[in-house]
Amino acid sequence: PPPRRNIYWTVTARAARPLPGSCGQPWRSALYNARTDALNRLDRLYAGRPYSTAMMKATLIGDTATLDQLWTENFRRTGTYHALVISGLHVTVLAGVLLFFLRVAGTPPLLALALTSVLAWLYALLAGLQAPVLRAAAGFTLFALARFFYRRGRILNLLAAVAIGVLAVDPEQLFEASFQLSFASVALLGAFAVPLIEATTHPFALGLRGLTDLARDPHLPPRVAQFRVELRLAAEALRVPVLAAAAPVRLLIWIWEMFVVSAISQAGILLLMITYFHRLSWTGLSANLFVIPAMSLAVPAGFLAILANSTLAARLAEAMLFFSRWVTDLHARWEYQTRIPDPPSWLAAAALAALAAMYLAARHRPRWIPAAALPLAGLLGVIVAHPFAPRVLPGALELTAIDVGQGESLLVAFPDGRLMLVDGGGLPVFGDKRPRPRLDIGEDVVSPYLWTRSIRRLDIVAASHSHEDHVGGLPAVIANFRPREIWLTSKAPSPLRSLGVPVRELQAGFHADIAGVVLETLSPSQEYEPGAEPHNEDSLVFRLTYGRHRFLLTGDREGPIEAGPVDVLKVAHHGGRRGTSPEFLDAARPSFALISAGLDNMYRHPHPAVLDRLAVHHTSVYRTDRDGLITIRSDGRRLSLSGTQ
């Protein structure tokens, strides 16, 4: 396949050895040295506090090497993750702080803008030239250039210019979630939030300036001048200073503006969030009201700590970080876990059309924005409710081998639409002292596939056995799809027993009729005693019979299986050498064989001997490592096969 983002190979260095001399460009060496020095200073400032160290490295420098995903999960759930990771928000905050101090110091406005633009690009370099920071730096530079030529920098014009420049250099960014979310968020602010604020509270915010200067009143709009007079009268009646009386008004204006910005940005990008992450945060609106100001203070304080080696600034940044964590933890307790499948294309198109109509209304009458948003809100409500049936073929038995790499996950759709997932994939791990994998197969591979099938809930989740490459992804799948039952091998150890879902223990002899499909458990036998550790022979073996067709799902079982003739065989243990014996194939005589294995895996699955045995029996073999996702359907009379490379 073609390289993605110009990455052709990934390699791992087993050891490093410094070499004498120098190489590369001097400016790059200086940049890397500065970045390394900043990271080392954070290590010293937060010595002995791994959480603070990792979070501040990620927030300030964009280094996520030591960041545990568990630490950021509540930020993701509450829709505040954007304030934590390095983004355009950081550039905006730093630029605003620097501009403020330069103006206080008496720096000419144009010179202050030029110096701030240089800082934005230096920060982009320090952060590793990450795309969100580059986009923000480019946008601020264009804003500064507009001011140099005495032009007003309008948000949408600046955004369009930055987008054209970015896509001219790297057109592939158009298909990146980061690009789409960043530009959509800013476009929504420029198209809706700014006009609405300008039409509602902005005039009164300007009216609070120079409140004690009576000579300004005649030069202001009548309603603003009247507002100033009434505020002074209120202060006199309450016998408080005018500025003290104005403080609550300033706070209310700030809360309103933050609410408008947060509500419009979150509602506007909801369709993208569902498309890419299938998440909806019910508490994100209130969480952002607290987290964004806190992290906006943590960022400049953190950089002051790095530059001045200031323990006091480091503690302030850490305090804001812990406050943000407390806010997200609190909101996460109230957050109802909502994961949403892909919406139908026509519904997404209708939502985009409603957004366009809302923009046209906003251009002429900004005060109409709330009313114009009602059709969009209704369509988004339908998208969230998702009253659509799963995309399965009625009246057919369907078996899908999901491409989960070196693991296994099978989706079974019964003729009446009931759904069973057998295994959830996972990354093979070795030993107890191992780092937690950054990739969760259940969250990042299996769940997105199920959402593309418009699936919101599973009826059954079955774990063939408890090896990590089969059950590692199931906790995420169970959390996302809330199955009605979990099926496990009787008496076998399993981490799934404690997840709060009813468990049914199975062994040979179990029999169920599901919409005309006869499901039987062939293994393990009733005499089998599982050990303390998971073993391949713990595997549940299922035979599904529908009309004239039989499907056999073998897990990782390598021992003998008495299944009789079958039409579709899921080959045991990813095609391992000790499974799928010649004697078994003589009895089974499958027409189709499915093998779930990772591309170029270290175990060399499937074994050539197994492939040779299948070839001798004229079995058509389909492999996830070469063929991708594979689906076989039966209507009880005919078999059909489809796949995706």
Image (cartoon, grey):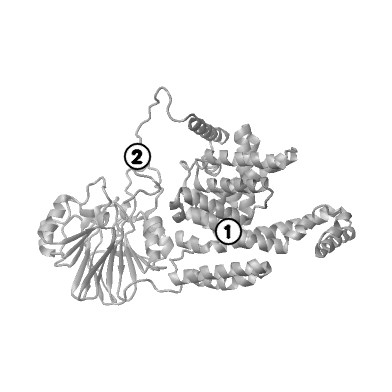
Q: Marks 2/1: CA distance?
A: 39 Å
**Percent coordinates x, y for residue 425 in the rendering:** 33, 55
For residue 60, side relative to residue 68 (left or right) = right
Q: Which residue is identified by label 2?
A: 11
Find disc 1 in the rendering and name its residue: 187
Q: Viewer-proximal residue, 42 or 520?
A: 42
Residue 230: quarter of image? bottom right
358 up-or-down from 316: above or below: below
Q: Residues within 10 Å of mark 1 (few under 14, many from 20)?
A: many
The quadrant of the picture occupied by the C terminus is bottom left
In depth, the one of 423 and 187 nearer the eye is 187
Q: Is residue 62 above or below residue 212?
A: above
User: Which residue is rendered at x = 11% and y = 57% of the image?
Assistant: 582
Q: Could you say where residue 49 lies in the image, as x and y percent from the top left?
A: 54, 38
Which numbered disc flags the more N-terminal residue, 2 or 1? 2
The residue shown at (14%, 58%) is: 614
Horizontally, residue 476 falls left or right of residue 126, namely left
Name the kind of residue labelled 2 in the image. Val
- Residue at 12%, 64% in the rendered image: 589
Residue 259 at least partly seen = no
At which x and y percent is residue 271?
50, 64
Going by the image, does 290 lie left or right of 39? right
Q: Position of residue 324 (x, y in %)?
A: 60, 50
What's under tag 1, amino acid-wise? Answer: Ala
Q: Secondary structure at mark 1?
A: helix
Residue sitting at the far top: 20
